[in-house]
Image (tube, grey):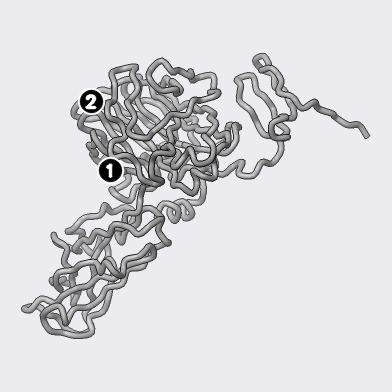
Amino acid sequence: MGQLVLTQEVPATPVAGKGAVYIDPADGNLKMLNSDGSIDFLSPSGWRDRNFLLNPEFAIAQRQVPTTLTTYSSTTARVYSADRWCHDNSAASLQFHNVDNLASPVAGVNARFIGEFKVITNPSKFVLMQWLDGNESTELAGRYVRFQFKARYTVNPATLRLGLLYLNASGTVDTPPATIASAFGATGVDPTWGTNLAVVTPLTCESNGTINASRGSAAVDCVLTAAFQRFSATFQVPAGANIKNLVPVIWTSTIPAANDIIQITECGLYNGTEIRDYYPRSFGDELLACQRFYSKSFPLAIAPAASVTVANGGYGAQAIQNRTGSGTAAGIQIPITFPVRMAKVPTLTLYTPVTTGATAYRFTGTTPAAQGAAAANTNATTDIGSSITVTNEASTNGAIGDLCGIHWTADADI
């Protein structure tokens, strides 16, 4: 029986159309070095296919109607649109929604959804990022990672930058600085990053990108075309206590004009340097993972708000009235149980079904009526649920057996 004996050494990058198989002396894994400098692992390696990014195709957007362009304007602090994805923009305003790739499939995209970002009102740069929580950031400390995504422009040409930030040892874990970018810079100039944010220098990138440190940060230039391209780069994450949070980030190098559109999908952050084919989690698993950071009582396709009809939004959290009479002493308790245990004790916001304000409503027959003022019992709010205290209205106390309801959102995001 013949044997193939390989020397443990990293070969020179082969010429176009060739690949070199070798054993990496650094970790003992069997690998193949491609002509573009990318590396494929030919032997199993722990988290090889685990995507550390959540919501990689922007499918889940609980804070808005996911398919409706929704306006965000945050020039000084982060704002979330799609779950787990936050952004800043240099001038008003930026819109986001997701596009269903199943309805009209786009060449080069395997994902069901595509995130679409549209600049409106004024020319504006924007920064898009995901903050990995401290647990997962620690797991990647000292390791080699690959950050990749697909993108294109649909109106005017644009250049993105692909980079990796981290909250350094002087920061507090899971606590981003109040200002992510204190200045966004002109065309070809990178943002000035906020307090305790440091840049990881990319080691390699795909042939359609260029590692460029002359713009202010060590990052990769990604020149978009009208067709989707995959862009990616490898990085070595700082070791040990030097890193509190890891932050994959995409930002515009050019300044998009009003009505310019950039589409992004199939985002991934993987342990190791190999380029990965995109394989999504099941939608149910993805949603549960996102709900650790943000959840709501509304259906997924309904934006949280007061005045949402029962037909569209349901009843929210519910309880049965078991006594009557006005005043706090006659109040009822509406229990809330979050879909999953959240990442921390969340900020709870209450919404009144069918009308404005934060008042619980009772439902008798087809016409809802005010039940009374409602407030979260802060002593009872934990990472798994809460209890809402409701007072009865003196003139409209209702009857024992009435169904009472109130809507809520729970925000535990970083």
Residue 184 locus on image (x, y percent): 29, 25
Residue 225 locus on image (x, y percent): 41, 21
Q: Quadrant where the N terminus lies?
A: top right
SS for callout 1 = loop
The answer, for residue 103, to whether it is visible in the render is no
Work out whether 155 lies above or below 241. above
Tag 2: residue type?
Answer: Ala
**Image quarter of residue 103:** top left
Q: Which labelled disc corresponds to residue 302?
A: none
Q: Which labelled disc corresponds to residue 258?
A: 2
Query: Quick check: 36 left or right of 309?
Result: right
Observer-side mark, 2 or 1, equals 2
Tag 1: residue type?
Answer: Thr
**Image quarter of residue 118:** top left
Extreme residue toward the front, this view: 170
Residue at 35% x, 41% y: name it.
176
Work out whether 130 lies above or below 312. above
Residue at 50% x, 41% y: name it.
241
The answer, for residue 33, to whether it is visible in the render is yes
Work out whether 163 lies above or below 411. above
- Quick one: label 2 or label 1, which is nearer the N terminus? 1
Residue 229 locus on image (x, y percent): 47, 26
* Residue count near mark 2 (Cα–Cα under 10 Å), binned few <14, some 14–19, many ≥20: some
Residue at 64% x, 19% y: name it.
35
- The residue that mark 1 highlights is 68
Query: Quick check: 410 left or right of 209?
Result: left
Give the CA distance from mark 2 to mark 1.
18 Å
Residue 236 locus on image (x, y percent): 55, 31
Q: Between 42 and 368, which is closer to the camera in this rendering?
A: 42
Query: Quick check: 386 left or right of 391?
Result: right
